[in-house]
Amino acid sequence: MGDAPKFDEKSLRELVRERWGEVAALAPCPSYRDLVRRVDLADGDRVLLKIAHPDEDLARLDAQIEALHRAEGAGLPLPRVRPDRHGRARDLVRDASGRECALLALDWIEGDLLADRRERPLAFWRGLGRELARLGAAWVGLDAPVLERDQPWDLGRALFVLDHLSLHEEPEACARVERAAVQFAGRVLARADELPAAVIHGDANEHNLLVVGEGASMRVAGLVDLGDMARTRRVFELAVASAYAIFDALDPVAVVAALVAGWTEVAPLEAAEIEALPAAIAMRLAVSVTASARALRERPGDAYLAVSREGAWRELARLESIAPADFSDALREAAGRPGLHDERPAAVDLLERRRRRLGPSLSLSYREPLVIVGARKLAPRRGGGRTSTPSTTSVTSATPARRWRARSASRRTA
């Protein structure tokens, strides 16, 4: 990926002065790959300066700018693009290494990071659900082919975790990720044609949410960082937000139900979306622990990666302890569609009893005939233990997971 853009403070001040005015102060802001600064202008105004990584796709950046314009028109709490003195939404500059980078400024949004707030009442999550649904409505018709391309964090391609099970040292960790992937393939990807497509933000986590107010009046003041925007399944927006929202929550089901309730105040959810949500939440956590493990190999001293990974493992294990039927029933109730329970096949009750007796590791039913897609054999690991490796005798066929990959382009335009 390469290093972030390289600019010293003097160069940054000059860039800002030429485009937005004299600088009173600069302060760094965290970013995974871009150069981001809070800029206090001499006239008392404040903006967020972003210099994108040299590898940033300019078409994707332009799509994000268009998305921000649409959000502004809908009165949503996303940052407003601040044009420069020449009316440009973005410009191109070269860093100290001679690499060309895109530069833009956004209005500064006042508020606390949700990550810095311990109190997170259910009313807040309900409000976030409403804002995410409103955002989806504002982005209907956003025509940007670049958003159709594969995004690393898009749950539509999340089965990549099965290729990286060896990153997890503990056998139970491997098994937990594998179980999440199997459930996701069967309960979500196999029904992808029933899940509406939409452009989603895709990363409503506690470090991208700014909040104001206390207690019952606590609300979303800002949603930032559109780097994971994609056109994919609409329910994945709720799945991502839920995966982070349940961290250390006393009642994770109640938190997800609050998000669903808020969403459905603005837009109804399809029955298939409600049924898919629990497995999609677990899959996001499985993706998170896998991505963290990969990143920690490259940056072993990064404490933030280690902390976030521990939380994701904890919540993934906790989700496995929740009876799927109870989770789904709570979400149907929150969506105002409790009658959907009566529409399920009569055999579901029997299958749920079997799951409770036999545990979460054994899948007992499929919406379509089971076809073996591959096998894994246990190979000795140095120092003891075993690790799973792809078997050379794998059997493949037209399974839900493979059909998902083959038809992803047509589904995204559905």
Image (spheres, rainbow, N blue to C red):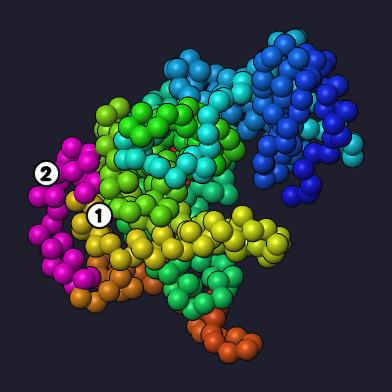
Membership of 399 in magenta stretch: no
The kind of residue tagged 1 is Phe
| Residue 5 percent coordinates (x, y) | 80, 39
Q: Which mark is residue 339?
A: 2
Work out whether residue 333 or residue 308 is closer to the camera in this orientation and state it: 308
Q: Is residue 365 left or right of residue 162?
A: left
Q: Is residue 286 above or below residue 249?
A: below
Q: Residue at x 67, y 20 (%)?
A: 46
Work out whether residue 389 or residue 128 is closer to the camera in this orientation and state it: 128
Using the rendered view, name the quadrant where residue 35 is placed. Answer: top right
Q: Is residue 378 above or below residue 347?
A: below
Using the rendered view, name the quadrant where residue 79 is placed. Answer: top right
Q: Residue at x 48, y 72 (%)?
A: 173
Residue 51 visible in rendering? yes
| Residue 390 percent coordinates (x, y) | 54, 76
The kind of residue tagged 2 is Gly
Name the residue tied to disc 1.
327
